[in-house]
Structure formats: C-alpha cells, structure tokens
Amino acid sequence: MGRTVFDFSNQVAVITGAALGIGKRSAECFAEAGAKVFLIDINVKGGAAAAQGIQTRGGDAAFIECDVTNAAAVKQTFETIMDKAGRIDILVNSAGGFYTQFDTADTPEEEWDAVVDRNLKSVFLTAKSIVPIFQKQQSGRIINLGSMAGLTTLNPASPPYAAAKAGVHCLTRVLAFELGKYGATVNAIAPGTTATERVIAVRNEEQRKMIGKATLVGRIAEVEDMVGWVLFLAAPESGYLTGQTIAVNGGRLMV
Ligand SMILES: NC(=O)c1ccc[n+]([C@@H]2O[C@H](COP(=O)([O-])OP(=O)(O)OC[C@H]3O[C@@H](n4cnc5c(N)ncnc54)[C@H](OP(=O)(O)O)[C@@H]3O)[C@@H](O)[C@H]2O)c1
C-alpha cells in the first residue's frame, strides 16, 4: 500500500505525551512532513531522546518537560513555545493512559483523581492556553486522543479512564463549538487497543493476536494506524470536519 505525503512546512505542532507511543510517532511524522515540533512530556529521558532522534534525522524538534495536569506548568510551557516559535498551528493531546486496572469498589479516590486529571483535565488545561492563540491567529487544529473505552465497554475497564475518555470526546465537541468561529477545528480519535511499547510490555503475542481476532480486519492496531489519522486531522483536507470522534478500531466497534 502507498503512503500519503503530508506537508506541514512552516507549521508548528505541539504534542503532549510525546516521549512514547502514539504521541512520539506523531511528533516524528509531523517533523518528517516539515513541521517544527515541540514534544511535551513528564518523561524527561524519553522526551529528550525522542526530540534528539528527530533532530538527528534533520527534523526541527525541541523537548519541554511539563506535567500536563499542572495548570502553572502548562501555562508556562505554552508561553515558552510562543516565545520561541511565535505561533502554534497544531495541538495533539496524547498524554494519558492508566497503569492499574481496578473495579469501581476498589478504586482509591487518589487513583480516580490522578487518572481523570491525566486524561481529561490535561485537555482542559492545554485548551485554556491554546484558545487565545487560535483566536488571534484565526486558525488552528486540536486533535485529542480519546479511546474506545470512552465509547463503549467491551472488557473490564478502568472506571476513571473510561469516564475521562468519554469526557474527552465531549470536551472535543464543546471546544469545536467554541473555536469554529476562529477558523479552528477540534476532533478526537478513539483508538482500539494499539501495540505501543507499553501495550507490548503487558500483553504477550498470543494476547495481542486474540485482540486482533476481535476486530473485523483481524489484527491489533499498530501505532501507524493511529498516527495517519492524527496527521489527516491536521491537514487542509479535513478542514470541514470538526467536533467529531473518529473510532479507529479495525471495525471492532461500529458507531
Ligand atoms: N495504546 C492504546 O492501546 C490506546 C488505546 C486507546 C487510547 N489510547 C490513548 O492514546 C494516547 C496515547 O497512548 P499511548 O499508548 O501512545 O501512550 P503511552 O505510550 O503510554 O505514552 C503516554 C506518554 O504520556 C506521558 N504522560 C503521562 N502523564 C503525563 C503528564 N501528567 N504530563 C505529561 N506527560 C504525561 C507518559 O509518561 P510516563 O510514561 O512517564 O507516564 C508517556 O510518555 C493516550 O491518551 C491513551 O489513553 C491508547
């Protein structure tokens, strides 16, 4: 199969959760397509290495350490990026996830708060910084990483994660409503299970095959399956699409 060639020359892309997985590969692909990329993550070693990797291949990348659940840190990060780059064209909110699966009765309150903050408050905080920038520019794109877990429940789910991702899909619509008048679009993708480094570490090959068998296309998603959508949602061709959550799950769930 061929590969669509995207062109993001002269554009500035900010990607949260860019040290690993979908965020990291999105940053690499935006840089390959000519964008100046800012990689945001709490993981300093991974984020710096990801930015360094892009630079080594001739891309324009910088890493900024930021906890996207911390309002002051997020505000400072966006001010730093505007000082350095003067504009932001694309924001990808990929920071998220959860680390322990609890049932509701066993979920510690701290776990609820941490997972909701990581997955939902983070999108609110970055939006607070980006809205005035897009208003001034009269343009911009936001791509949020939601989840199939926020659309339906097919497996045991982390309660705060599923609820937060449903919130991300909702906030995507609210932001699309607010930002349309500035010529900016806001969309989300809701991935099915995707074979990132973290998923490969916790699901063996047999389990990944079983996940693939539950889809219509017969395989687990690769990171590239998600990144293509992230780039497309930032491309000029998708300018009439806003407020949508694209369910990218190999047909496991059709909505
Ligand atoms: N992979 C899947 O199967 C899948 C399925 C559906 C939805 N998604 C969603 O897609 C997005 C990307 O998933 P992924 O699997 O590529 O993620 P990942 O590999 O787990 O990477 C997420 C990155 O975000 C960072 N991060 C976590 N909390 C942060 C914070 N407070 N501030 C800044 N950075 C933070 C993580 O750092 P640490 O490693 O230090 O925590 C990590 O580098 C997530 O929102 C996830 O929920 C993934």
Image (cartoon, grey):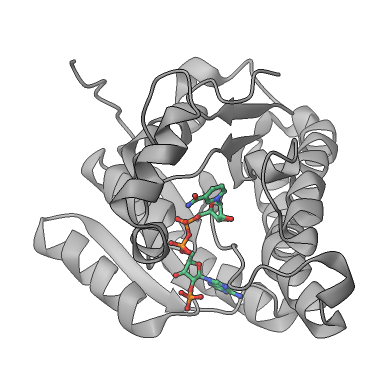
Q: Residue at x 43, y 60 (%)?
A: 85
Is 10 located above or below residue 163 in the figure? above
Location of the N terminus by quadrant is top left
Whether residue 173 can be seen here: yes
Q: Residue at x 82, y 82 (%)?
A: 108
* Residue sitting nearer the eye, 207 or 49: 207
* Residue sitting nearer the eye, 236 or 115: 115
Location of the C terminus by quadrant is top right
Q: Residue at x 66, y 31 (%)?
A: 185
Is 142 located above or below residue 79 in the figure? above
Q: How many marks?
A: 0
Residue 198 place in picture, x, y as percent: 40, 64
Is 187 located above or below residue 25 in the figure? above
In screen coordinates, is 38 left or right of 142? left
In screen coordinates, is 189 left or right of 1? right
Residue 217 place in picture, x, y as percent: 40, 19
In screen coordinates, is 81 left or right of 239? left
* Residue sitting nearer the eye, 85 or 202: 202
Residue 226 place in picture, x, y as percent: 43, 37
Is 147 located above or below residue 74 in the figure? above
